[in-house]
Structure formats: C-alpha cells, structure tokens
Image: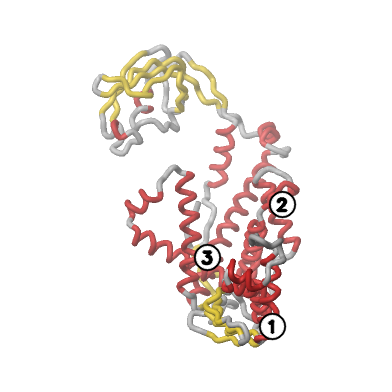
Amino acid sequence: MKTTVEKLEHNTVKLNIEIDADTAEKEYNKACKRLAQRVNIPGFRKGKAPKAILEKNIGAEAIKHDVLDYLLPNIFSQAIEENKLDLITQPSLESYDFELGKPVKVVAKMELKPEVKFEQYKDLEVEVEEFKTAENAMEKEINELLEKFTTLKTVEDRESTDKDVVMMDFDGFVDSEPIQGGSAKNYMLDLEHSNFIPGFAEQLVGHKTGEEFTIDVTFPEEYHDEKLNGKPAQFKIKLNEIKEKVKPELNDELAKKVGNFKTVDELKADIQKYLDDTAKVENDKRSAAKLFEVILEKMSADIQPSMVEREKQVLVADFKQKLAQSGVNWDEVMKKDGPEKIDEELKKEALNRIKNSLMMSEIAKLENIQVTPQDLEQKIAELAMMYQTDKGTIFKEIAKNTAMIQSLSQQALSQKVTKFLLDNNKIKFVAGDKK
C-alpha cells in the first residue's frame, strides 16, 4: 500500500493512495461475505449466496464502495499521522479506479489548518484608552441602594410633585373614540421614572387626591401601535392616591439589612471593591481587544474561501435562531437589508472569527498553553453558578452534548491565552472615558 501527499493551493492537500491488487481482492471477498449477511436474496439463506449472485443482485460497485468504506479510515488516519497533517475537515473521496486484479488507485482531498505566522505577539507596547470610574460613582451606587430600600407613604394634605408615586384611574381617547387597551383602574405610576407617553406624567403634577381632570398628549411618530402614530389623544384622569417616597438613612442598621456588613464603612468598602473590579475588567477587555487588533494586523494566514463559507453558515444558523426567538422572520430581514449586504457582513464576521481562533490556537501551541481538568472544572462551576444549579447537573448536560465540552475547553483556552498576552505585553493607558 502506497500513499503520497500532494500540496495544493489554499492549504488543501491531495492524497494519492494505491492499494495492491492482492489486498484489494482479499478485502473484496471479505466484503462479499459481510454484505451477504445483510441482504435477502431469493433462494438463498443469509450469508450463503455465491459471490456471482451477490454481484448480480447488489452490483459490483456497491461491493467496492463497502471495501473502500472499510479500508480508507485507517489509511487516512495513518497518512495523517505519518505526515503530521493538521486537518480542519475530514478527508473527502475525489475519485477511485477499482478493477479486480489490478492495484486500486484512490484520490482524496482534505483541508489543512492554515499556517499562521506572526511578526510579533510578545513584548509589544500598545496604547489603550483607560476606563476610569466616575468621581460620583460611589454616590450613584449608594443612591441606587437607598432607592431599593425606599418605602412609600400616603399623603393627603398637598398636591402631587414630580418625585411622587400616584394611584389613578385613566381612560384614553383618540378622535373621541376609546383607545384599545388605553384605560386602567387604580394604576400605580412613578412620576419620576415614567415610561408613559411623553408629557403624560408631567401633567399629573400639581393635583390633589380625588381630583378629576383631562390631559392632552400626542403619541410618538413611531409608536408600537401604528394606528396611533403621531395622533393627538386625551386622557381622563382620576387621582386616587398620592404616595411620597421615604428614603432610609444611610447608617449601620441599613448596612446590616443590605448584606453581611456591620457598619457603613464596611458597606462602602465593598462598593469600592466592586467599582475597582469593574474598572479592571473593563480595562483588561480594552487591552485585550487592542492587543488582538495589533497582533492580527501583523499575522499572516492563507485562509481558504471554503473555510470562510463554513463559518458563515454557522453564523447564519445562529442568526436565524436568534431572530426566531425574537419573533422576526429571516426572509423579512433579507428583504429589508438586502442579501448582498447581509452576505458581505456575515463573511466579514466569519473571517474575523476564524482569524481570532487561529491566533489563539497558534499562540497556545507556541507557548505550550493547555487546558487542564482544573480549568474545565472552573468553567463548569461558573456555569452552575450562572444557572443556579449544582456542578453535577452541568456534568449530566455535558454528557448529553459533547459539543458543550469542546465549547468550554475553547473558552478556557481563550482566557488563558488572553491572560498570557496581557502579562507579556506592555499596556500604556491614556486618557479615556468615565462611567
């Protein structure tokens, strides 16, 4: 048996395989016996039909296919190992010449992982816009915390203000006709944080409990109900109750209610840690993104069009699924944006994903960065926390879906490579935005 490897363009290789005549004939006879056990031939018990009868009933070509299906996986595996071929697709049979008594010639093709070359990926110096926590961030966090513990107190001796919460009945009309779904009884509305039609909440300010009045508003030009787009409307209002927001004091008692804190100082220290951690995560994210950009600019890889097309199809499937979950039809999106534009964007995204994946795997290979069982266990623990379940449940899900373990391994590897790049390159932070 002889196998030669011929390199073609775009990281494709051709395997020329020659199986000697004796081996081919022996395997052909074995295939006849295997197939005779599977087919029913009138007048013969299973496995007892002569070769000539079998060839007549199922055809010599079917038998030859069975021979190749039996032999080629091992031949391919041996050729891949001997030639150290890094595949991204399984070998595909291009042609074969199978005539009994003569050597069998087989031609197969396979795609290799593109060879990646870096100009530089370590000891780089890049500038990154630094994310800094805003000066009033602590104040905002504390105010949000106080909002969560705010209570409501009914007031009767004054008019409503834009900081109040009101209970009301309302009936809406357009052109003197009731608006479908435009009425409610004893509806609670926070006048400070209203998501009603612009101008609605503002006109509820300055009224007393029990007061009945009418307000005029105009629906936005792009409203979710097209029949109401830009329409003037009237709402009859009855103000049933005014509630005043009562914010708690920021003291040690509140700190104890918030969490495992004894004092306000402990609470503030925890908030500051959260703010610092958030800033670090964001700056790491920005630094990694900049490093990827610089490294990819200086990386070369001959990425074959077929590779981009396969990745594009993965993106299409993901895109269709997300649209379906949102109740949006794929054909409508294609019609709106145009197939050419969508195809171009998907190909661009597919190419970016491939380049990033190649970069990650090649750096991991060069630096001997590997995913350990402990890394996978950590990813599983993170999933368990995210879905509020135990690690055993996640293990069971992984057992049902082998693609899941591959995805977790890839995530873990990406994180380790990213950390390596952050540790082995110099980041110079420059003035940027604030939160």
Mark 1 to mark 2 CA distance (whole Å) = 53 Å
Task: Answer above or below: position of 304 versus 161.
Answer: below
Q: Residues within 10 Å of mark 3 (few under 14, many from 20)?
A: few
Q: Residues within 10 Å of mark 1 (few under 14, many from 20)?
A: few
Mark 3 or mark 2, which has the lower sequence index?
3
Closer to viewer: mark 1 or mark 2: 1
Q: Residue at x 59, y 66 (%)?
A: 57
Give the residue number, with chain letter if any, for mark 3. Answer: 289
Q: Residues within 10 Å of mark 2 (few under 14, many from 20)?
A: some
Picture mark count: 3
Give the residue number, with chain letter if any, for mark 2. Answer: 381
Query: Could you say whether the residue bearing mark 3 is in a helix, strand or loop?
Result: helix
Side of 258 where 304 appears, left or right: left
- Where is residue 399? Give x, y as percent: 71, 53
Mark 3 to mark 1 CA distance (whole Å) = 56 Å
Q: Residue at x 59, y 57 (%)?
A: 281
Instruction: Tell me the number on the disc at residue 246.
Output: none
In the foreground, 291 or 106: 106
Task: Answer above or below: position of 17 versus 238.
Answer: below
- Where is residue 79? Give x, y as percent: 65, 81
Give the residue number, with chain letter if any, for mark 1. Answer: 23
- Where is residue 344? Give x, y as percent: 38, 64
Closer to viewer: mark 3 or mark 2: 2
Task: Say what amino acid the circle numbered 2 marks.
Answer: Ala
Mark 3 or mark 1, which has the lower sequence index?
1
Q: Residue at x 50, y 60 (%)?
A: 314
In the foreground, 429 or 282: 282
Task: Say what amino acid the circle numbered 1 marks.
Answer: Thr
Query: Could you say whether the residue bearing mark 1 is in a helix, strand or loop?
Result: helix
Closer to viewer: mark 3 or mark 1: 1
Mark 1 or mark 2, which has the lower sequence index?
1
Task: Say what amino acid the circle numbered 3 marks.
Answer: Ala
